[in-house]
Image (cartoon, grey):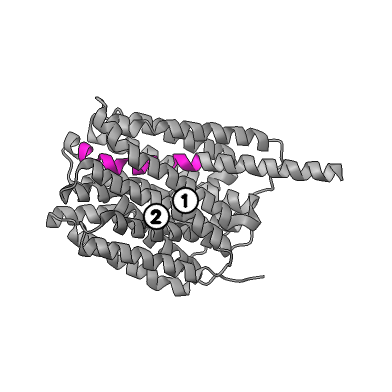
Amino acid sequence: MQHSYSASTSSRVAGLYAIVAIVLVAIALRPGIVAVGPLLTFIIDDFQLSHSTAALLTTIPDVLMGLLALPTPWLARRYGRNPVLLFALALLCLAMTARAFSHNVEVLLLTTVGVGAGIAIAGALIAGYIKGNFPSKAALVMGIYATALSFGSTVSAAISGPVASVSEHGWRLGLGIWSVLAGLGLLAWWWLALRERKLAPAPAQAARLPWRNRTAWLVALFFAADNFLFYAVLSWTAPMYSEYGLSTATAGYILATFTLVFMIANPILGAISTSLDRRGLLAGCAAIALLGLSLIALAPNWAPFFSIALCAFGLGGAFTLGMTLPLDNTHSVDEANAWNAFVLTVGYLIAAAGPLALGYLRDLTASFQAGNWLLVLVASLMLLLTPALKPQLRH
């Protein structure tokens, strides 16, 4: 009896250690992208960039999160999950530091490639880890992971602008300080890897990517729509409201409201979604996001904090559920990794067009209005997808 109690306690402690490491890594995975939004005006002025070129600072990481999702499972099988994840976090830390010292556009974009690669590789491995270590609580732990991602987004969105405004180093410090979080994530996972080294991992096997699976494509398209909207709003909310006459600080607070409410929605939907058939909640989240984006398109200066909060809650809940959908449709870690790689590839490659499309439309029309209606259209498509997202209930 004592032995059984000790084993149970040890298992719970190990699970807690793993969740702490997941949280610290997740917090580090978004500031390298999110901090760009509040600082875009400074960066555009410093390098004399067009809005389309400036959008690459968000688009490049999105593209890499798509492209690198496919080879990452192979890298994990070849070299081991933990060494690959540690390499990714080290790359992220170094690239964010180096980007703060960029003195021309080429170096700025090259270091952004490093940031995107680090985020892409690390992020692609987390879902499989959750599937393998928390199979009966996947939605809950995914909600915790998504909340931690959003927490990093919220802090960087709220702090980067004020830091840049008061520091003599301007946007460089506003971007560079977030390398500290990547360093903490690196240490946390290194510590977890040392603990897991004593365990004999099950041999990893390659699972086929679900290229011919209709449900996988629908899941990927839903995830793509959600992230298209997320990264477009993330990139251009602060510049848009600055153009609408609000102060830089107020525009930054609106962006921070978006990331804060997005973060709040993550654990709420992760906790209340207990059925494998999540279509009702998915539709509700999509509808709330559509309402918020419609208000912004129709009357951007009418209650902007309320409108952006509606948008954020819908997108945040849909993000948590969307990341859980590949796990709902699979029965093993290897299959979950394959589905996750597929969904991330399709999803982020499409999502990368979001910031770029809004930047292009802003250059083309000298206004954000056309871009706002594009977001309404994408949210409508996301809502229309939800009835078809019933999971494959295989035995």
Q: What stretch of residues is rendered in magenta?
A: 25-43
Circle 2: is it few (<14), some (14-19), or many (20+) Cα within 10 Å?
many
Give residue 296's position: percent from left, percent from top.
Answer: 25, 60
Of the pair 177 and 53, the residue shown nearer to us: 177
Whole-angstrom CA distance, mark 1 to mark 2, is 9 Å
Task: Indicate the quadrant where residue 118 lies.
Answer: top left
Left/right placement of residue 266 relative to residue 106 reads right
Give residue 233's position: percent from left, percent from top.
Answer: 30, 53
Circle 2 residue: 348
Question: Which residue appears at 37% of the width and 33% of the height?
Answer: 96
- The correct choice, above or below, for 302 with respect to 239 in the image is below
Question: Which residue appears at 63% of the width and 52% of the height?
Answer: 134
Assign a secondary structure to mark 1.
Answer: loop
**Badges 1 and 2: C-beta atoms under 8 Å apart?**
yes
Question: Which residue appears at 84% of the width and 42% of the height?
Answer: 3
Circle 1 residue: 69
Amino acid type, label 2: Tyr
Give residue 62's position: percent from left, percent from top.
Answer: 37, 49
Give residue 292's position: percent from left, percent from top.
Answer: 31, 62
